[in-house]
Amino acid sequence: MPESTDGKRVNLKELKSGGFIKQTQRDLFTVRLRVPGGRLDIDKMAKIAEVAKKYSRMGYCHLSFRQSVEIIGVHIDDFDALVKELAEFGQEVASCGPRVRVPTACGGCEYNPNGIMDAQKKALEVDKDLFGTECHHKFKISFSGCPIDCARTKGMDLGFQGVVTPQWEEDPCTKCTLCAKACLEGAIVDDEDGTPIFYSEKCVQCGDCIKVCPTDAWTAKRKGWIVRAGGRHGRHPREADEIVKFLPDEKVTDFISKTIEWYNKNGKRGERIGKTFDRVGLKTFKDEVAPSFLTE
C-alpha cells in the first residue's frame, strides 16, 4: 500500500471509489470529475482548465468514454488542495466503485433535430437524485434521445432510448410523398396517387415522418422511453434486455429506484445486474418490477 509524503498509508480501493484512480507513474493519480450528460458550463470549463494546469504534472486532461473530464497526473499530496479549489466553483469529483455512476446522455431534443426525448434533462435529474447510490457493483445509466442510440443504451445496466409512434390523418395530407422519402426503413411507401401506406412492423419509431410533414398529417400518437436493463461492455459483454416501452418522463427516476432496490435485494456483491438476471431469471425482475410501469 503506497504512502503520501507525510507517511500516511493510503487505500487505493477507497481512493478509486472516490474518483482518484492510480496511474502507472508513482504517486500520480487520474482525478475523474462529475459531468452528468457531458454537459459543462463554459465558465466552469475554463476554471477546470486553470485547476488542471496548476495540479496536473503531465500537462493534459482526458475526456472519458462516459463523458467525464479527467485531470491526469495529480500527485497524491495535492488531493486536498485540488478538491478544495474545484469546490469553490461547484465542481465535484465523480465516484467510482459499486454505486450508481454519473449518467451519460446525448443532446436529446433540446438542440438536436433527431431528438425525441430530452436526454440531457433526465440525465441531470437522475444524477441529482440517485448519483452515488450504493449497490453490488458499478451501475451505469444512459439516455439516448432517439433510435440512433448514440448513448448506447444496449450496453448499460439501465438504458433509456426515446421513441415516438406516428399516426397519419388523411384530411391534412397533400400527398407530397415527403414522408416516404424521409423514412429510411421503408415503413412508408407511396400508393399510386401519392397516399402514404404505413407498415408499422418496419417502423423504428424515429419520428422522421412527423418532422418532415409540412401539413401535420403525421403526428405523434405517443412517445416515451424504451427501457433496457442488464447490458455491459468489457471482456464479457452482454446486450441489455428490453423491459418497458413508452415509459413516461415522470416515471424514469421511480423506475431506476425500484430497479436498484430489486438489484440490491437479489444480486450478489461483485455481480452486475445482468449477471443477476442470468442467475435469478429475467422473468423474476419483469414480474416484480415492470408491471406497474407497463404502458402496452
Image: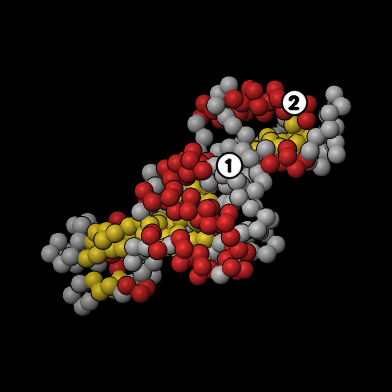
Looking at the rendering, which quadrant does residue 28 occupy?
A: top right
Residue that carries the numbered disc 2 in the rendered image: 78
Residue 51 pos. (x, y %):
65, 25
Residue 291 pos. (x, y %):
40, 63
Foreground tag (2 vs 1): 1
Residue that carries the numbered disc 1 in the rendered image: 132
Residue at 63%, 40% (x, y): give it.
Answer: 95
Residue at 59%, 25% (x, y): give it.
Answer: 87
Quadrant, the N terminus? top right
Could you tell me if residue 149 is visible in this image?
yes
- Judge left or right: residue 88 versus residue 163: right
Type of amino acid under label 1: Gly
- Judge left or right: residue 93 versus residue 219: right
Asked if residue 203 is positioned above or below residue 138 in the image, the reply reads: below
Residue at 73%, 38% (x, y): give it.
Answer: 15
- Judge left or right: residue 207 versus residue 28: left
Front residue (pair 140, 145): 140
Looking at the rendering, which quadrant does residue 22 occupy?
A: top right
Type of amino acid under label 2: Asp
Residue 79: which numbered mark, if any?
Answer: none
Could you tell me if residue 158 is visible in this image?
no
